[in-house]
């Protein structure tokens, strides 16, 4: 069982388990003690027989049952359940569509693995993991906007791009950030300070010269003790950073790169040839490829492939890890996303138009 879906703690949902021979009195006591508003009635081998709520008990009492009656007479035997690994958004959609606030998680044998609770899905758990944001680029393609303002401080929707990234990550439980700064870095430090204004902790890596993303994270001190996120400071997206982190961990990867499906249509008809012979035609074909989306998750051990203070970009780091037989994977994105690298990208971001493609 992973915690990617915001399952409540094992200890709490275990307390909500009732044996199949329980009475209504035991069920009432269980509901009072757990405050989960649901009881999970199981067989001795952990198979879910049904669920029970306070409303089920009240309806049973109205039918003439007493406190010593068996719960098996009032349980819901075919409740909505989900398998492990289903996304948080899907669970919330199922809950909303079915007007319920609790969903058991079962394996293929219908053994209980956990419990989703509406309120806990909506309130993100704390993430101790570090998030490193690259904020040192000169933004030369965005001049004159970046002549006196670092690119991450350019406003989108009334606040700097970098502030959008930090606030989104904070909304998913992240509280520790490191900003890698170089060009006009003092302006970024002056704006964000130690992060207390946003109730987060912000530290800084100060590059004396551009080092690339890999080179910047080689300067992290102290070294992270858990998987950490790395994001370009000019990437605006609706990605769920917590789900990305959990995806990385569940696959046992050393490094994960977010990718997007990029489509490009050839404006011309393509002639397929073999020597001088025409063997076919394809009218304005569409080429599809996965491109780097600029957000990563790394294990602390990935830093062993870096030399502190030496230039290294992320593709190079991933190649080095592959050469060391480390597992490197991709996280296909479908969420709206925009890399604000050019003036027309900035205008699109300021107009609230992010790219959305399906992977």
Image (cartoon, rainbow, N blue to C red):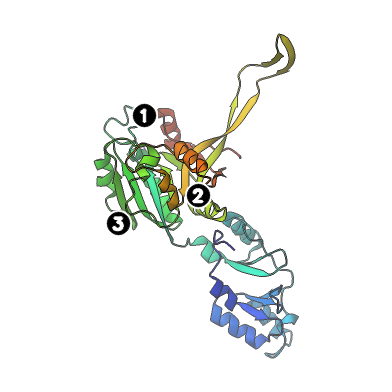
Task: Give coordinates of residue 304: x percent, y percent.
Answer: 41, 47
Q: Is residue 233 visible?
A: no
Task: Answer above or below: position of 168 versus 32.
Answer: above
Is residue 168 left or right of 281 when viewed as pictured? left
Residue mark closest to the camera, 2 vs 3:
2
Q: Is residue 295 above or below residue 59?
A: above
Which sits earlier in the primary sequence, circle 3 or circle 1? 1
Provide the secondary structure element on which disc 1 rests.
Answer: helix
Q: Is 65 on the left or on the right of 99, as rendered?
A: right
Give the secondary structure at mark 3. Answer: helix
Q: Secondary structure at mark 2?
A: loop
Q: What mark, if any, has residue 196 been given in the picture? A: 3
Give whichever of discs 1 and 2 has the lower sequence position.
Answer: 1
Find the distance from the CA under tag 2 to the CA under tag 3: 32 Å
Identify the residue under disc 1. 142
Which residue is at 73% across, 88% downward? 64
The quadrant in which residue 330 appears is top right
Residue 183 at x, y = what percent? Answer: 28, 36
Q: Between residue 51 and residue 318, name the one nearer to us.
A: 318
Reading the image, the residue beneath label 2 is: 254
């Amino acid at each position: 069982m992973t915690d990617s879906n915001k399952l409540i703690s094992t200890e709490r949902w275990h307390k909500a388990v009732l044996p199949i021979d329980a009475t209504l009195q035991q069920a009432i006591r269980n509901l009072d003690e757990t405050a989960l508003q649901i009881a999970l009635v199981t067989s001795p081998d952990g198979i879910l027989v049904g669920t029970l709520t306070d409303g089920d008990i009240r309806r049973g009492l109205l039918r003439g049952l007493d406190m010593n009656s068996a719960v098996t007479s009032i349980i819901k035997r075919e409740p909505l359940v989900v398998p492990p690994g289903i996304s948080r958004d899907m669970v919330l959609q199922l809950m909303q569509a079915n007007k319920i606030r609790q969903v058991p998680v079962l394996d293929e044998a219908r053994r209980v693995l956990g419990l989703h609770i509406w309120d806990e899905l909506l309130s993100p758990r704390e993430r101790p993991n570090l998030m490193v944001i690259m904020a040192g680029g000169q933004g030369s393609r965005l001049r004159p906007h970046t002549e006196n303002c670092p690119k991450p401080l350019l406003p989108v929707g009334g606040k700097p791009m970098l502030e959008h990234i930090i606030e989104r990550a904070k909304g998913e439980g992240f509280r520790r950030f490191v900003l890698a700064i170089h060009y006009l870095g003092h302006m970024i430090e002056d704006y964000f300070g130690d992060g207390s204004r946003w109730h987060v902790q912000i530290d800084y890596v100060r590059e004396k010269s551009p080092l690339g993303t890999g080179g910047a994270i080689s300067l992290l001190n102290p070294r992270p003790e858990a998987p950490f996120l790395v994001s370009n400071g000019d990437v605006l997206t609706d990605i769920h950073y917590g789900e990305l982190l959990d995806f990385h961990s569940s696959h046992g990867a050393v490094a994960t790169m977010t990718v997007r499906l990029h489509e490009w249509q050839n404006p011309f008809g393509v002639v397929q040839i073999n020597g001088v012979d025409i063997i076919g035609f394809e009218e304005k074909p569409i080429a599809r490829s996965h491109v780097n989306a600029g957000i990563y998750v790394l294990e602390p051990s990935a830093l062993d492939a870096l030399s502190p203070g030496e230039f290294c970009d992320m593709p190079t780091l991933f190649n080095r890890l592959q050469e060391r037989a480390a597992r490197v994977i991709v996280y296909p994105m479908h969420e709206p996303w925009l890399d604000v690298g050019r003036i027309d990208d900035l205008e699109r971001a300021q107009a609230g138009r992010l790219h959305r493609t399906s992977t």
